[in-house]
Amino acid sequence: MGDTQQEKKYACWLDSIRFLSSAGKYKLLDAAKTAENIYRMKESDLTFFIGAKGSMLITQAKKMQSPDMVYERLLASKIKYTFCGAGDFPKRLSRIPDPPFGLFYKGALPDSAAPAVAMIGARKCSEYGHCMAKELAQGLGACGVDIISGMALGIDGISQRAALDAGARSYGVLGCGVDVVYPKSNQPLYEKLTERGGVLSEYPLGTEPKPMLFPPRNRIISALSDAVLVVEAREKSGTLITVDMALEQGREVYVVPGRCTDNLSRGCNLLLRQGASAALCAWDIINDMGWDALGARMQEKKTNGVSSYINGAELTPLSRAVCGLLDVTPVAQDTVIMLLREQGFSQTVADICRELVELELKGIIERGAGQYKLRDDIALRK
């Protein structure tokens, strides 16, 4: 099938018909061979292939708007479209049991050749979940791993913002029309994603977010990824639905362990008991997935075991060395200077003090009585 604008135009028209299932569209495409031929099919033929209800939906759509009208409105909104018969349709999606027929998107589509990890978890996450999502997304992003998520509150949004801060690409899969920002508070994230990644949806423009639309979109989140990382999840959680879909699609599943007494970690710990792999840092995933080139990049970005990104801030070699020296036990300023000298750093005392102040302002270290220590949550991830 030719990857032409003409075909996309007719496919877009078909995909804009609400309540017409993807399975029905695929059945019609298999019979008609082209999207344009579907538009020109007789009502009796439509009924034969997809039943009276589906035939009625298509017949009504023909009377209401033409393919040209639908496509022109799409382009006027600066929204793009692709479908299963086009060359730019993500290859990962074509290999799952129930692929979407097409995608509406803003920005770019994920590169099927690039490594990608889906990061998912609780909307009302804990401080621990917030910190781990940020740290893992920054670590993966800094090494060139695309982060896929649902642009929701909590773990989704935190992971995607952290990935963008680390210079990575991130893609949001929406449970509504791609022209609808949900939740509204994520408008800034939506704009950033369209600039440095993309937002996409299988639902027609103007589709409002409804609970029943989110579980189906989760299969796209997992399908666009090589692995799924669960940061925080309750024992009975929608996140676990995505995990089931990922396993069905043959994706690797990683989990951030949590305390046994934490409700938000019970789902994660249950997955660990069922055989999921634990992810304590980005390196665990990169190493397990065999992304050797990315692993080499990660090693280059570390000094004294400290990542070059902490709390969204890119650290200088001196800052990383300071963080490598510090832990939860306070250390005197003079001791820090002496240990840096032993490591070969020749900066003046004033420069080192200025670096300590910068780290304190960034919320990475804490000072008390002339002594310095790493902030507790950062020390635990060191």
Image (cartoon, rainbow, N blue to C red):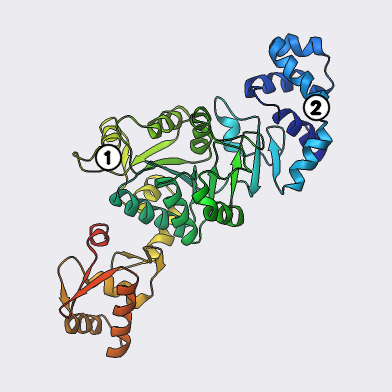
| Left or right relative to 370: residue 238 | right
Q: Amino acid at mark 2?
A: Met
Do the CB atoms of the residues marked 2 and 1 lie less than 8 Å apart?
no
Q: Is residue 216 visible?
A: yes
Give the number of the disc on residue 369.
none
Q: In which quadrant will I find the C terminus?
A: bottom left
Query: Could you say whether the residue bearing mark 2 is in a helix, strand or loop?
Result: helix
Q: Is residue 3 visible?
A: no
Q: In which quadrant will I find the N terminus?
A: top right
| Left or right relative to 154: residue 61 | right
Mark toward the start of the polypeptide (2 vs 1)? 2
Q: Amino acid at mark 1?
A: Ser
Name the residue rendered at 34%, 77% in the picture.
358
**In this orientation, which residue lies closer to the viewer: 193 or 220?**
193
Where does the image place residue 316, in percent across and percent down from the top left? 38, 75
Above or below residue 280? Residue 37 is: above
Above or below residue 256? Residue 209 is: above
Name the residue rendered at 31%, 68% in the picture.
363
C-alpha gap between disc 2 and disc 1: 50 Å
Name the residue rendered at 53%, 56% in the picture.
188
Where does the image place residue 123, in percent across and percent down from the top left? 39, 42
**In this orientation, which residue lies closer to the viewer: 14 or 300?**
14
| Left or right relative to 52: residue 212 | left
Name the residue rendered at 77%, 42% in the picture.
73
Q: Which residue is tagged 1?
A: 265
Above or below residue 110? Residue 191 is: below
Above or below residue 157? Residue 103 is: above
- Say which quarter of the image contains residue 3: top right
Give the number of the disc on residue 64.
2
| Mark 1 residue crowding within 10 angstroms, few (<14) / some (14–19) / many (20+) | many
Query: Could you say whether the residue bearing mark 1 is in a helix, strand or loop?
Result: helix
- Say which quarter of the image contains residue 4: top right
